[in-house]
């Protein structure tokens, strides 16, 4: 059985706030640890009213401190927003506090719009083409490379597994070249998934961190006691995607049983495309979908995300997904 992990966007639901989101995140992490999930990752986003994980490293420390064994990591840190040295120090600190439990996934997107990017004090004259050099610089800090004039303290000499995240072929090629594990964002950008997996596996070069390719795929799960209940739960995420793509990001909305019937053909087509890698249904339905997806992709690990409005329903969804894994998903 391949490992299953959790991707949590620390959602802020309508009528709630960041403080409640953080409490729910820690609660979910503790349950996920007990249910056998391998990792618990949080993603860096900025200026998003419905996502509370902007200060990703800070929140990771809170989650790692409130759990015992589950790996905790970033899925990911958007490296163009940061100095590689700062990230080496932050994650060196986390690894020093919680040894052997910290992962560092790196993305090349800013995770924000241009206005927010300026507020982050990014150098907008540089672009994502510098991402490969930044990744290598970050790896050098952890390795304590004498080629760097500055030493990351803490950070140098610590083993923090680095992952390359991607939703296109660029990340696949970079991860293969550097010999790093690769996490593909198939939970919201599945169109290039199979091609990216093929390129990564074909071009992979062994490294000190990894001797053979390792692919983790994002996957949406909306599980409930019945298929009908799960379909309703999924409408919160569907609303969020349509609002985001329409330039109106907001807080996670309550489920709406009539939502799909009210939106237009274009919106329905967009949802069918971006949420193609999803399982919506009862435990049995989810188990079959997971089995089919793993068989089709040959994934080494799945990272499950469940953007569900009600916290108890979200917990139940992850619990049912864990049960589906036990069935042989």
Image (spheres, rainbow, N blue to C red):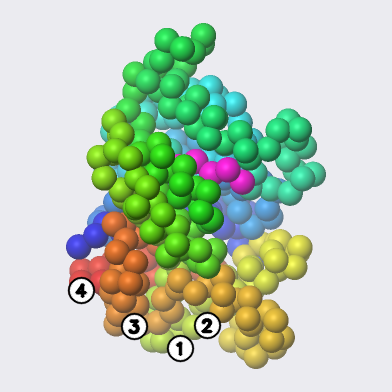
Q: Nearer the viewer, residue 257 or 174?
A: 174
**Callout 1: 10 Å neighbours few (<14), some, many (20+)?**
some
Q: Residue at x 53, y 72 (%)?
A: 275
Camera-side mark, 3 or 1: 3
Q: Are marks 1 and 2 in contact (CB under 8 Å)?
A: yes
Q: Quick check: is 27 in the magenta stretch? A: no
Q: Which residues are magenta?
A: 105-109
Q: Residue 327: give its label.
A: 4
**Callout 3: 10 Å neighbours few (<14), some, many (20+)?**
some
Estimate the spatial distance between the alpha carbons at disc 4 and disc 2, rounded to whole Å: 24 Å
Q: Residue at x 56, y 58 (%)?
A: 11
Q: Secondary structure at mark 3?
A: helix
Q: Quick check: is 106 in the magenta stretch? A: yes
Q: Secondary structure at mark 4?
A: loop
Estimate the spatial distance between the alpha carbons at disc 2 and disc 3, rounded to whole Å: 15 Å
Q: Are marks 1 and 4 in contact (CB under 8 Å)?
A: no
Which quadrant does the N terminus fall into?
Answer: bottom left
Mark 2 sits on what residue?
232
Residue 283 vertical position relative to residue 123 in the rendered view, above or below: below
Residue 145 vertical position relative to residue 300 in the rendered view, above or below: above
Q: Nearer the viewer, residue 329 or 171?
A: 171
Camera-side mark, 4 or 2: 4
Q: Are marks 3 and 4 in contact (CB under 8 Å)?
A: no
Q: Nearer the viewer, residue 217 or 208?
A: 208
**Callout 4: 10 Å neighbours few (<14), some, many (20+)?**
some
Which quadrant does the C terminus fall into?
Answer: bottom left
Estimate the spatial distance between the alpha carbons at disc 1 and disc 2, rounded to whole Å: 7 Å
Q: Secondary structure at mark 1?
A: helix
Mark 1 sits on what residue?
228
Mark 3 sits on what residue?
285
Estimate the spatial distance between the alpha carbons at disc 3 and disc 4, rounded to whole Å: 12 Å
């Amino acid at each position: 059985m391949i490992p299953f992990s959790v991707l949590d966007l620390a959602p802020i639901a309508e009528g709630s706030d960041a403080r409640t989101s953080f409490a729910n995140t820690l609660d979910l992490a503790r349950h996920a640890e007990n249910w056998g999930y391998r990792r618990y990752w949080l993603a860096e986003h900025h200026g998003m009213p419905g996502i509370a994980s902007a200060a990703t490293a800070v929140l990771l420390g809170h989650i790692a401190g409130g759990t015992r064994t589950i790996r905790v990591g970033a899925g990911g840190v958007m490296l163009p927003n940061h100095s590689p040295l700062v990230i080496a120090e932050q994650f060196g600190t986390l690894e020093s506090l919680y040894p052997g439990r910290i992962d560092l996934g790196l993305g090349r997107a800013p995770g924000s719009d241009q206005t927010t990017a300026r507020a982050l004090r990014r150098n907008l004259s540089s672009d994502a083409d510098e991402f490969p050099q930044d990744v290598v610089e970050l790896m050098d800090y952890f390795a304590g490379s004498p080629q760097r004039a500055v030493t990351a303290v803490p950070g140098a000499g610590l083993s923090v597994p680095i992952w390359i995240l991607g939703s296109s072929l660029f990340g696949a090629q970079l991860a293969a070249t550097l010999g790093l594990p690769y996490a593909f964002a198939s939970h919201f950008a599945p169109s290039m998934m199979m091609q990216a997996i093929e390129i990564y596996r074909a071009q992979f070069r062994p490294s000190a961190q990894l001797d053979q390719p390792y692919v983790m795929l994002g996957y949406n799960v909306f599980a409930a006691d019945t298929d009908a209940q799960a379909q309703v739960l999924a409408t919160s995420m569907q609303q969020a995607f349509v609002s985001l793509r329409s330039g109106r990001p907001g807080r996670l909305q309550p489920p709406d049983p009539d939502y799909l019937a009210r939106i237009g053909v274009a919106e329905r087509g967009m949802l069918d495309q971006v949420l193609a890698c999803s399982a919506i249904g009862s435990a049995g339905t989810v188990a079959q979908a997971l089995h089919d997806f793993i068989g089709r992709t040959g994934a080494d690990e799945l990272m499950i995300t469940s953007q569900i409005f009600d916290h108890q329903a979200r917990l139940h969804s992850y619990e049912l997904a864990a049960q589906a894994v036990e069935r042989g998903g």
